[in-house]
Image (cartoon, rainbow, N blue to C red):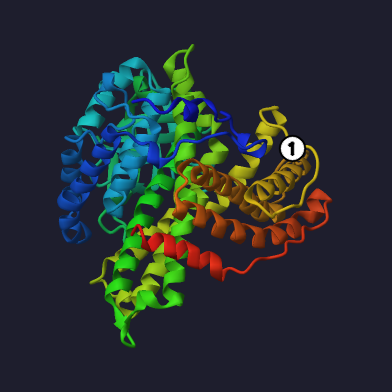
Amino acid sequence: MRYPKRAMEATARHTGAFLMRTPEAIFTPEQFDAESRQMADATERFVREQVMPYVKRLEHGEPAQMREILVDSAMLGLLGIDVPQEFGGLGLPKTTSALITEKTALQPSFAVAHAVHTSVGSLPLLLFGNEEQQRRYLPKLTSGEYIGAYALTEPEAGSDALAGRTRAKRKGDHYIITGNKIWITNAGFADLFVTFAKVDGERFTAFLVERAPGVLVEREERKLGLHGSSTCRVVFDRVEVPATNRLGEEGEGAYVALYTLNIGRFKIAAAAVGVAKEAWRLGYDYAVERKQFGRPIIDYPLVWRKLARNATMLFAVESALYRLADDLEHAFTANGTPPQAVWRKAAAHYAAECALLKVAATEMLHQVVDDSLQIHGGYGFSEEYAIAGLYRDTRVNRIYEGTNEINRLNLVDRLVYALRKGIWTPVEGHTDATDTPEATLATLRTLTGSALRAIEPHPEPPQAFVEPLAEALIALYLLESAYLRAQQTRNPAHQAMVALYHEQVRRQLAGWSADLAELTQMPPITVPTQPMAPLYEQVWSALRKVV
């Protein structure tokens, strides 16, 4: 499965490249071939026909039903979308993998069970497993014979995952693992737990732990949402684990956890885009059908402006998602070194962009779901309408795989680290022009580059500056991605959404520059704003022609 040569070669291929220059082209969803679209359509049919009818049973305490659904999904290859064919997977490009993930997200409980199994439950084996481990477990994971889980979080170790107290003690050809894990997705029916423990209380290490005596799975948690997914506390009571099931070397657990979480964050962003599209559709369809004061409520600007704004943010995030997916695919398929070394490097390299996209996508999703529920009015507060379930189910997206606060810190920290390593360099000169998207992008590069350079001498990013800097970085990446996509497609709706998003970014730019002025020693930027009403009208007019 190959993509147009220009899209593959013209993009700057390293973390932080968006801080230096605008590439000539990026991969966009319009470039998917027929095979990828057919796979996406088949996945959507599976979710709508084979998953959604069982939601009520899943949500009323039948977690075993989820295992059956996951096993059924294996027949479409959905449990091995990122696993190479030699281990029974499909080995899809990261772009197609993201598209499939979008479709699985249409039912969030299934989406989280599937995502944990296929990303953090399987990827550690690809990145750190030896050949024997890979051949023993990956075919079972891709076929559904085994379901995977990821046991990292502990009562006293959430965002600070390395503070875990679970212990492992070497005893001959085994390790004895003792400790507690919480919020473990798929725990109720998982067969294989990627588990983290400190050997002798010091060396943070990963293990492949099969369900066995001593692995005590407690009752299902009573959660705000995702009632159809299994989430339990897991107690390891002196569990004997063969030394051959250690994943990587002693002390490498941090790399296993963090490299895997980077890709997990990218997958969360893809899922957020998929479920946001579904929420937007629910809001649109209801607004068309619902009449008040003698007219469909979609005719009222206070309603259709919500839809126009959210379609614009969806477009920007989707554009960034597939731009990053293509960059990841290029990194994962680099030649000249053993594949596992390439995969590890790729999983680590784009940590900043994965954190950025996770924040942007999940916060976009929150706004889309909230506005769609608002459009439903009182009916949106009723469980009889699908939007109520989405509202509950999507709230956790800003919490797991690193809270959005942690990911803002990660975004800044990883870009500063890359700056110190010389991977990217700040743009020289100064500009505060914002009259065109190109000018605003240059101004954002000046602002964010100066702020990151000022942070570089600090051991840790000063948190007072992290939020405005992270917001400016997100706006830079999203605006550039949306602008490039619109330039490539020449689609009037895309161009109208870029114009609207550009004005939204301009209006916030003055605030970010003021908040960062103490750090950058640059005067705040003054931005003469433009009327928003015509921009909203252009977006809505273009959307009504294609919806």
Residue at the top extreme of this rendering: 336
Q: Residues within 10 Å of mark 1 (few under 14, many from 20)?
A: some
Along the horizontal axis of the image, is 429 left or right of 275? right
Along the horizontal axis of the image, is 393 left or right of 339? left
Residue shown at 67% from the left, 55% from the top: 468
Label 1 is placed on what type of residue? Val
Closest to the observer, 232 or 438: 438
SS category of the residue bearing label 1: loop
Callout count? 1
Percent from the top left, x then y, of residue 8?
48, 27
Q: Is residue 225 visible?
A: no
Closest to the observer, 37 or 340: 37
- Please name the residue that numbered disc 1 is placed on: 427
71 up-or-down from 378: above or below: above
Residue shown at 32% from the left, 61% from the top: 281
Percent from the top left, x then y, of residue 489?
45, 43
Percent from the top left, x then y, of residue 57?
16, 59
Along the horizontal axis of the image, is 54 left or right of 89? left
Q: Quadrant of the C terminus?
A: bottom left
Closest to the observer, 388 or 103: 103
Q: Is residue 279 visible?
A: yes
Quadrant in which residue 226 is drawn: bottom left
Residue at the bottom extreme of this rendering: 293
Percent from the top left, x then y, of residue 380?
32, 74
Residue shown at 73% from the left, 48% from the top: 447
Q: Quadrant of the N terminus?
A: top left
